[in-house]
Amino acid sequence: MTLLKKKRLRNSAVMMMSIAALSLVGGNLLFAISDTSISEPKVLNETWHFTGSTRQEAINPDFYEQGSSPECDAGAETICEITAPIDPSSSPSNPKPHMEALVNGSQTVEEQILEALDDGINDTVLSLRSL
């Protein structure tokens, strides 16, 4: 075999090994990148107490104040306390519950409140009270 052919053969072998190594590293890198998942930020719920009395007021965020209420009793006439995230569009100095936030990915806070007025407490409505 001539010297020129040996050099070409050696260069070809080195090139193929380099391509194979890059493919392996690149494939692992691609797998690692595609395997990472970006999770949604967790939404923290707050406790809110209802200050109104009517069904319409129960789904109006202006009738809720942050924190628990000492007025919750064994009555079942209206909402007493709910859990919901802060509405991002409300004022930081006067936060309100986010009525359109999804609860368990299926119903909104508002829908859960209306359901609780008919059927009792649920994932959003923590307690009921007398009027």
Image (cartoon, rainbow, N blue to C red):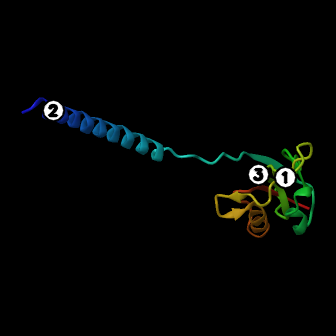
Image depth: mark 1 or mark 2 in front: 2
Spatial separation of the CA atoms under disc 3 and disc 2:
80 Å
Q: Earlier in the sequence, mark 3 or mark 1?
A: 3
Viewed as shown, does residue 24 lie left or right of 52?
A: left
- Please provide percent x and percent y for residue 72: 85, 52
Q: Amino acid at mark 1?
A: Ser
Q: Residue at x 78, y 63 (%)?
A: 110
Identify the residue position indicated by label 2 in the image. 4
Label 3: state its secondary structure. strand
Q: Residue at x 33, y 42 (%)?
A: 23
Question: Mark 1 — residue?
Answer: 89
Q: Which residue is mark 3?
A: 83
Which amino acid type corresponds to the residue marked 3 in the rendered image?
Answer: Thr
Q: Amino acid at mark 2?
A: Leu
> Is residue 107 placed above or below 11 in the rendered structure?
below
The image shows residue 114, relative to residue 15, as above or below, that is below
Q: Distance between the Cα atoms at labels 1 and 2?
A: 75 Å
Which quarter of the picture shows residue 52? Answer: bottom right
Badge 1 element? loop
Decide which of tag 1 and tag 2 comes sooner along the chain. 2
3 or 2: tag closer to the N-terminus: 2
> Which residue is painted at 32% across and 40% down in the image?
24
93 sits to left or right of 42: right
Label 3 crowd bin: few (<14), some (14–19), many (20+), radius 10 Å: many
How far apart are the two marked residues, 3 and 1, measured between alpha carbons?
18 Å
Occupied quadrant, residue 113? bottom right
Count of numbered labels shown in the rendering: 3
* Left or right side of 116 for 56: right
Q: In which quadrant is the N terminus drawn?
A: top left
